[in-house]
Amino acid sequence: MTTESSPRPTVAVVTDSATGLSRAMAESLSVGGGFLRVPLPLMVGDQIFTEIDDPGVNEKLVVASAEGRRMTTSRPSPGAFATAYESLAKEGYEHIVSVHLSSELSGTVDAARASARGAAATVSVIDTRTVAMAEGMAVIAALDAARAGGGPAEVEAAAGNAARRARLLFYVPTLEALARSGRIPKSLAIVGQMFQIRPIATVAQGRLKYLERPRQEASAVKRLGELVAADARQALEEDRTTVGESGRVVVAIQDFYGSSLADHLSDVVAKEFGGDAIIQRSTVPPVLAVHAGLGPVSVVCEPASLVHGLTSTVA
């Protein structure tokens, strides 16, 4: 964070709403200035919503899902990015680092690059090759570097490092929504339903990748808890290698109407790591819930020293 005696940062950070930053966290991160989010539009039938502007969008998606209505997502328009970049340039920022979800999952990076070419400030567009709070960790690391007085290269490097070191796990209770959105073949969803498969996935090389396919919910929950603990342990060891015994791990848990599983995972982490873990809770981004349906849970583990801006808001 900057102080009155600190030089004003010259680098700003822009991101999209696929991070799933909670409203409180986004507001906290915005206090220092030089930070904007561009919403990803959601289409329910012929209606368009944005999860940033519409606090009731989650309920709308639940109703639409129950009614079997068509739901899709879209990348932001280049104009939305142009507006964000122009606003920050007018505030005096000389460079903007625009940090976004994987280009393998969305055209958001392309839209950002199209707007960057005509921006008043210079713009670097970062493809994090990930999503949800793994992307969010990159955003927070970039903000930390910018507010510490870092130049464009340092801010870009901070974002890239945090994105690479974030460990993302994603639990999908049913494959039906993924098939409906075209993310997986319908035949796979039918097989998954027959055998009660509850996949555990991650994002690798920018794309959704299934790690394991346990059968039955109880088996999946148990295995997911084991994988989360292992990821948290590795991130904690990395942080202690960097900062010594004071090192900690940030565990960001997001759910979309899957709070019982999210609560269980939070308890698993708290029991094993105690004060060495900083647990942060928020909602799976609605733009992901459109494709994953009701009940998905994501967990991201990150060495705490990489995301000071996050630890200062929740510690």
Image (cartoon, grey):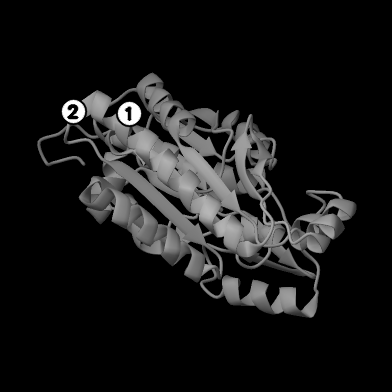
Q: Secondary structure at mark 1?
A: helix
Vertical position of residue 252 compared to residue 308: above or below: below
Q: Quadrant of the N terminus?
A: top left
The extreme left residue here reads 5
Vertical position of residue 136 compared to residue 235: above or below: below
Query: Is 245 on the left or on the right of 66, as rendered?
Result: left
Q: Nearer the viewer, residue 132 or 269?
A: 269
* Res. 26 in view: no
Q: Nearer the viewer, residue 311 or 95?
A: 311
Query: Is 305 on the left or on the right of 119, as rendered?
Result: left
Image point 53% across, 66% down: which residue?
Answer: 53
Image point 70% across, 40% down: which residue?
Answer: 107
Say which quarter of the image contains residue 237.
top left
Position in image of residue 165 (x %, y %): 44, 31
Check disc 2: other Cα within 10 Å, few if <14, some if 14-19, many if 20+. Answer: few
Say which quarter of the image contains residue 202.
top right
Q: Which residue is disc 2 drawn over?
A: 244
Say which amino acid is labelled 2: Gly
Say which amino acid is labelled 1: Glu
Evaluate if marks 1 and 2 touch, with contact meaning CB atoms under 8 Å apart. Answer: no
Label total for image: 2
Residue 102's disc is none
Position in image of residue 23 (x %, y %): 41, 62
Position in image of residue 16 (x %, y %): 54, 47
Position in image of residue 133 (x %, y %): 47, 47
Q: Secondary structure at mark 2?
A: loop
Q: CA distance from mark 1 to mark 2?
A: 10 Å
Q: Which residue is disc 1 drawn over?
A: 238
The extreme right residue here reads 187
* Res. 294 in view: yes
